[in-house]
Amino acid sequence: MGKYILVIDQGTTSSRTIIFDAGHYALEGSIFSAGATVQWLRDALGIISSAAEAGALAAEADQEQPVYLVRAFAGLGAPYWSSEARGTPVGLTRGTTRKELSRAALESVGFQTLDLLSTMYDDASTETSSAQIIRVDGGMTASDWTMQFLADILDASIDRPVVTETTALGVGLLAGWQAGLYPSPDDFGGTWKLERRFAAQMSQAERATRWAGWRDAVARTLLDTGRAP
């Protein structure tokens, strides 16, 4: 990566970013819906009144009910790449409430991120490390519950910045650089400021059990498409 392209065969993509006269490569993984899942809970199902309520409900969910939601509303992106897949809830019982559904929706973000990260490590032939730090951005980072689960399932420290709309910030910095108002791209990293770090608290045994349940749910989702792993 960096200025060197990586040949991919696992499910992510190697993308090229051009910043004026410099070519840089990045390893990229695409998830088709994340924040849209919370919107679905609010607007389509009507089980929450605001995005913030999903985290509060998830915190109250019954831990003895392992409910999974495979968010394939528009198919599944990396590393499965199935446009025919459709959203699938797995593990529903008579006792399942909006609390368990909210938890499953938020957890699905973490599970799909773990799928991507594991594939990226395979693609890059890099060993995983429990000491890794991952920076996040976007609207979903406002949910403390989701960020804690992300740290737990990835076994990583999750760093949330003061400015969570990183894409907009990057556009502004590049525009300012060209106008002569900001320093060069090499100095952009200095504008990043930590707001909070979420540390992993989940045991390795629980992490393995939860991910196995997720992969089983994905396999069920892909069964009808002929793409089951």
Image (cartoon, rainbow, N blue to C red):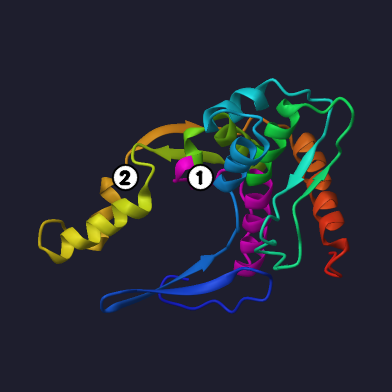
User: What residue appears at the point 66 percent right and 62 percent down from the top-left corner?
Assistant: 119
Tell me, yes or no, whether the highlighted magenta stretch contains residue 116: yes
For this orientation, the residue located farthest to the left is: 180
Q: Name the residue under label 1.
A: 133
Q: Is residue 195 above or below residue 133?
A: above
Q: Mark 2 points at which residue?
A: 192
Q: Position of residue 127 (x, y in %)?
A: 64, 58
Image quadrant holding the C terminus, namely bottom right
Q: Name the kind of residue labelled 1 in the image.
A: Ile
Pair 2/1: label in front: 2
Is 93 in front, or is 228? Answer: 93
Is 47 in front, or is 192? Answer: 47
Residue span colored magenta: 110-139
User: What residue appears at the point 82 percent right and 56 percent down from the top-left corner?
Assistant: 221
User: What residue appears at the point 86 percent right and 38 percent down from the top-left corner?
Assistant: 91
Where disc 2 sits, the SS reads loop
Mark 1 crowdedness (10 Å alpha carbons): few <14, some 14-19, many ≥20: some
For this orientation, the residue located farthest to the top is: 60
